Amino acid sequence: MPYARRDPDGRIEALFSEPQEGAEEFLTPDNPDLEAFLAGGDAEPDDSAVYLSATDTALARVLEDLIELLVQKGVLLYTELPGDAQRKLSRRRRIREHLGGVHPLLPEDDDIL
């Protein structure tokens, strides 16, 4: 989600949550054109909601990796999390492993400068 319609100069002129005629281009949340459009003041109020919704998945993954890191460092005990959170995190980890392994967004300790 969002799908962009561009003007003849290639600038985003509208965003949609579903593909539309003339707006079949899917933009990732980190697309610089999307960020510029939303930050430029030309965005409609609904555009910000589309952007937030589009970034929810990426943010959820960052939070999962952050929780995993805090547990690995001993800052947080996994069992201190609410039961529902434990089950959801465990299920997502198993699914990611089944789909080809976990690819953390955060670097390993050895990679940190």
Image (spheres, rainbow, N blue to C red):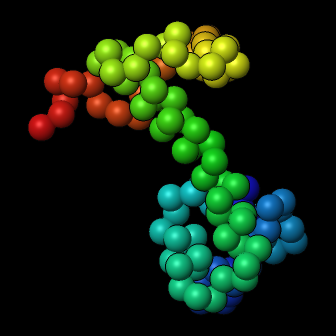
In the figure, is residue 109 to the left or right of 71?
Answer: left
Q: Does residue 101 appear in this view?
A: no
In the figure, is residue 16 to the left or right of 84?
Answer: right
Residue farthest toward the right in the current orientation of the protein:
21
Residue 90 quadrant = top right
- Image point (50%, 36%), residue name: 63
In the figure, is residue 103 to the left or right of 84?
Answer: left
Measured along the vertical axis of the image, is residue 44 above or below residue 68?
A: below
Measured along the vertical axis of the image, is residue 40 above or below residue 72?
A: below
In the figure, is residue 26 to the left or right of 29?
Answer: right
- Image point (57%, 57%), residue name: 29
Measured along the vertical axis of the image, is residue 7 above or below residue 97?
A: below
- Image point (18%, 34%), residue name: 112
Q: Where does the image place residue 12, in percent across and percent down from the top left?
A: 64, 80
Residue farthest toward the left in the current orientation of the protein:
113
- Image point (72%, 64%), residue name: 50
| Quadrant position of the C terminus in the picture | top left
Report how many numbered discs are placed on residues in the image: 0
Q: Where does the image place residue 64, in percent across and percent down from the top left?
A: 51, 29
| Quadrant position of the N terminus in the picture | bottom right
In-front residue for pair 38/27:
38
Q: Where does the image place residue 98, in percent across and percent down from the top left?
A: 61, 11
Residue 88 quadrant = top right
Q: Where does the image place residue 7, in percent across and percent down from the top left?
A: 68, 87
Q: Does residue 110 appear in this view?
A: yes
Measured along the vertical axis of the image, is residue 41 above or below residue 27?
A: below
Residue 28 quadrant = bottom right
In-front residue for pair 86/12:
86
